[in-house]
Structures are given as structure tokens and as C-alpha cells.
Amino acid sequence: MMENSNSELLAKIADLKKRRNAIFLVHNYQLGEVQDIADFIGDSLELSQQAARTDADVIVFCGVRFMAETASIICPDKVVLLPDLHAGCPMADMITAQRLREKKKMHPEATVVCYVNSSAAVKAESDICCTSANAVRIVEKLPSDEEIIFIPDQYLGNYVATKTGRNMILWPGFCPTHTRIQAPDISRQKKEHPKAKALVHPECRPEVIALADEVLSTGGMIRFARDSNTEEIIVGTEIGIIHRLRKENPGKRFIPVSEQAICPRMKLITLESVLWSLENMTHRIKIPTRTRLKAKAAVDKMLEG
Ligand code: SF4
């Protein structure tokens, strides 16, 4: 392909998007240039809700694979495209359906609460899905004597256990990007910016969470930045979100806790890959019906919660 200037590229994308009747759902961690072409930008829960609502024929999911799978679970009649098949979530790969079945055999009475960062096959083996935005609410609703297996993120699970007082069986998964954020990083930023509020994502380590003013999903961070009077905000999550925070709040200052908090898989989606995706209608994400129906039961509870 000949080299395009951004404006040529953007014009081609806009033209194809119209012809295909497509919508761009874009996660808060995407590259700034991809965020800027979004029809809707948000966290996993918000993007799933948008997928459920859209009347477009094609959903181009600018995020990682489990997000496109979730959209396909919710909207089986739509074409769901993931512009780069290598855009997978390493945390989601830390559990398989087979290993979960083995765990369930050891705890036959347990309810499986599954973070949305998981494959469709793992969701199909689970009872309820959740996102970081509603995990506490979902667990709180379960009867207090219920045995709970929480998968796959041990840190989100630990945070939910702390908030709800529930004793949960945790899977040892983690997000390699959020665990790069260390307690000394947040201590240093708080010392350098004493008036700032520190927001962190619940995928962070407990010692990082302990130093935060607020523990929020990315959607929660966006709302906090918009609604609070705080002028300076320390941001403890993947740094792609800083683009949106600055764009929507030009008068405020946003300081990443760590410049190392970059998810390489999220950054695989580019304007070029979005264009190729629309040109070739690739890569289609489709879930086999049996798996889809089982996973949908768990995802529907997430959307209700
Ligand atoms: S930031 Fe972490 S949880 Fe999110 S997609 Fe990347 S590796 Fe997965």
C-alpha cells in the first residue's frame, strides 16, 4: 500500500465506514489517533452496552479480542471485526475452559464470577460475568453464604473481596500492564503533586490500591475527571486513557503514575489496520452457537448488574 497522509487515510476510512454501515467502538486504552475516530469510546461495560444498542451492520472493535468476542456474543447477527488478530489480552489467556472445569469439580457448589477479560469459552463455563465497573455490585448481590470462584484476575478479585467482606477463591491471573505500576511510583507522584487526587484501576496490586484516593474503572475515571473540582489528577492505569482525559478536560492536569503502564496488545490497532479491516472485512469474530448461548447467559447478567 502506498503511504497515505493521515487526512487521506481518514477520508478512506470514513467513506468505507459509510458504505459498510459500520460503527467504531473504541476502548479507552487505544492509541489517540484511533480514539479520535470513535463513534463511542469507553470501558468494557460501556462498549458492551453500546454493542447491544447499535443498529449498524458492522462493528469494528478497536480493543482486544475478548471485547470483540463479547460484542459477538451479544449481537450474533452483526459482523464483528477485530482489526488485528494478535490483539489479545494476556490476562484472558491465563485461564482456559478446561482448567476452569477442573476447578469447578473441586468446588461443585460454587458460583463462578468471571471478569469480562476472558475468552468466550471461559465465559460459557461461568455463571455471571462482571467488569471492573460493576464487580463489587455483582458479588454483593450473591447470597452471603455462597461459595464464589472469582476468575481470572486475582487483584480485582482481592479488591472485590476486601470491599464486600466475602471470602472468594481467586484465580492467580493478573494484568501484566497494571502490575507494572508499583507502590513507590504512586508514592513519588503523590509527593511531587501534593494537591492531586490519585485514581487507580482495581487491576493494580493491593499495595498500589492502598495508596489511592479512588479505585475506579476507566469509565469511572473519566466521570471523576469531568465531575470533580480537582485540578490535578494522578492516573494509575494504562496510559492510553490520558489522551481522552486531556481532550475532555483541557483545564486540568493529568499525571500518569507510571509511563511504563502501556498495554502493547491494545496498541496493535492503528488507523491502517482499521482501514484494512473495513476493506477486507477481516478479522471476523464469530462464536460457535453452543458456546455463545452459554456465555450469553453470563454476559446478560453482567449487563443487568
Ligand atoms: S491492559 Fe491488561 S487487562 Fe487490559 S487488555 Fe492489556 S493486558 Fe489485558
Image (spheres, rainbow, N blue to C red):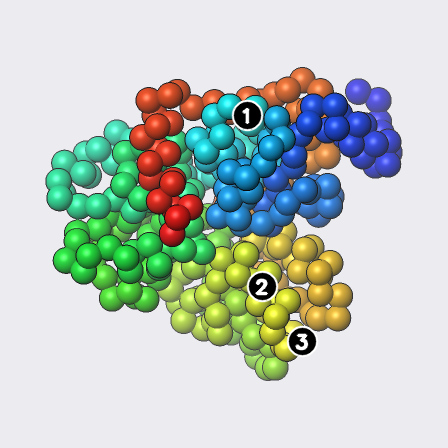
Compared with 36, 286 (above or below) is above
Q: Between marks 3 and 2, how big is the CA–CA gap?
A: 14 Å
Compared with 117, 236 (above or below) is below
Tags 1 and 3 touching, CB below 8 Å: no
Q: Position of residue 48 (x, y in %)?
A: 50, 42
Image point (35%, 59%), residue name = 136
Q: Residue furthest top?
A: 280
Q: Is residue 65 visible?
A: no
Which numbered tag is attached to residue 78?
A: 1
Is 197 on the left-hand or right-hand side of 18? left
- Secondary element at image label 1: loop
On the image, numbered disc 3 is attached to which residue? 231
On the image, numbered disc 2 is attached to which residue? 223
> Of discs 3 and 2, which sits in the foreground?
2
Q: Earlier in the sequence, mark 2 or mark 1?
A: 1
Q: Nearer the viewer, residue 212 or 295?
A: 295
Split into 4 quadrants, where in the image is the N terminus?
Answer: top right
Q: Nearer the viewer, residue 158 or 78?
A: 78
> Of discs 1 and 3, which sits in the foreground?
1
Dot 3, crowdedness within 10 Å: few (<14), some or many (≥20)? some
- Secondary element at image label 2: helix
Image point (55%, 39%), residue name = 53
Q: Nearer the viewer, residue 48 or 123?
A: 48
Q: Position of residue 179 (x, y in %)?
A: 45, 55
Image point (19%, 39%), residue name = 103
Q: Amino acid at mark 2?
A: Arg
Is 247 on the left-hand or right-hand side of 303? right
Q: Between marks 2 and 1, how big is the CA–CA gap?
A: 30 Å
Q: Position of residue 221 (x, y in %)?
A: 56, 62
